[in-house]
Image: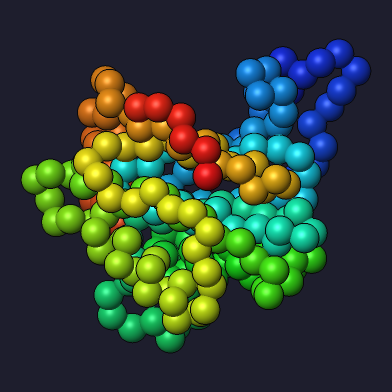
């Protein structure tokens, strides 16, 4: 997707993303005076720059992970904890991308390490897992249980979390500093997000292998 630089201060340009992340939407955010990368369901992004990573979560989970010493970090956004069935086919793993937590966590951590991070210095913050699909299986709870189990197994300590409840969230992450802003969405945007999650879940079923601001 084309990067948007229309609102950049005169004489400035958006610095290129790390290789492999050129397709994500990045734009100048005049409110925060920084470049913002938008992460959608099934995507992840890693940065070594002073920029913000943003997403909106319903029952999905976003893990914000960074190397606190080297200021390289990123965010993922996944809808389901793990795929059902065989996992040993390479083509299936490629097709899944980062839609499942089991892949999204590995891909995000590996990309941070590839960009210069060190595992022993990783800081983890996790958000989401709201019960916003009231008429469906509690996907949010399954996602929460998965990410907590994964982090325990991998011996990665959680520095902050905001999980569960019944509201969608907007998450804004600054990997250079590690700060996160979380805002609950309680207005008309809720219905749009729920409809979007229903559509996304249906698409995964048909294609199984391919409030206030809080600072953390």
Q: State left or right for residue 160 relative to residue 82.
A: right
The image quarter containing residue 156 is bottom right
Residue 8 position in % (x across, y down): 77, 19
Numbered disc total: 0
Name the one closer to the observer, 79 or 92.
79
| 25 or 212, nearer to the observer | 212
Residue 138 in the image: x percent, y percent? 17, 55
Report the side of 167 relative to 90 (left or right): left
Residue furthest out toward the left: 135
Quadrant location of the N terminus in the rendered image: top right
Residue at 79% x, 31% y: name it: 14
Asked which colour scheme the image uses, the reply is rainbow
Q: Position of residue 52 (x, y in %)?
A: 64, 37
Query: Is residue 167 in view?
Result: yes
Q: Residue at x 72, y 15 (%)?
A: 7
The residue depicted at 52 percent of the width and 69 percent of the height is: 157
**Residue 24 visible in the shown view:** no
Q: Residue at x 76, y 54 (%)?
A: 71
Q: Position of residue 5 (x, y in %)?
A: 73, 23
| Residue 204 horizontal side relative to residue 156, left or right | left
Q: Nearer the viewer, residue 181 or 170?
A: 181
In the depicted structure, whether residue 3 falls above or below residue 142: above
> Relative to residue 161, is residue 90 depicted above or below?
below
């Amino acid at each position: 997707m084309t990067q948007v630089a229309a609102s950049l201060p005169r004489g400035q340009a958006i610095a290129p993303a790390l290789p492999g992340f050129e397709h994500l939407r990045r734009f100048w955010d005049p409110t925060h005076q920084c470049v913002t990368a938008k992460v959608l369901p099934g995507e992840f992004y890693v940065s070594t720059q002073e920029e913000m990573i943003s997403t909106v979560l319903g029952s999905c989970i976003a893990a914000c992970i960074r190397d606190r010493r080297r200021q390289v970090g990123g965010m993922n956004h996944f809808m389901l904890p793990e795929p059902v069935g065989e996992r040993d086919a390479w083509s299936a793993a490629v097709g899944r991308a980062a839609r499942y937590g089991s892949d999204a966590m590995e891909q995000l951590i590996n990309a941070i390490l590839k960009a210069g991070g060190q595992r022993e210095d990783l800081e983890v913050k996790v958000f989401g897992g709201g019960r916003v699909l009231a008429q469906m299986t509690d996907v949010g709870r399954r996602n929460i249980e998965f990410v907590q189990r994964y982090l325990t197994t991998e011996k990665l300590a959680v520095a902050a979390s905001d999980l569960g409840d019944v509201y969608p969230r907007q998450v804004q992450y600054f990997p250079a500093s590690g700060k996160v802003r979380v805002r609950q969405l309680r207005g008309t945007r809720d219905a749009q997000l729920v409809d979007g999650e229903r559509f996304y879940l249906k698409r995964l079923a048909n294609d199984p292998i391919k409030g206030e601001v809080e600072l953390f």
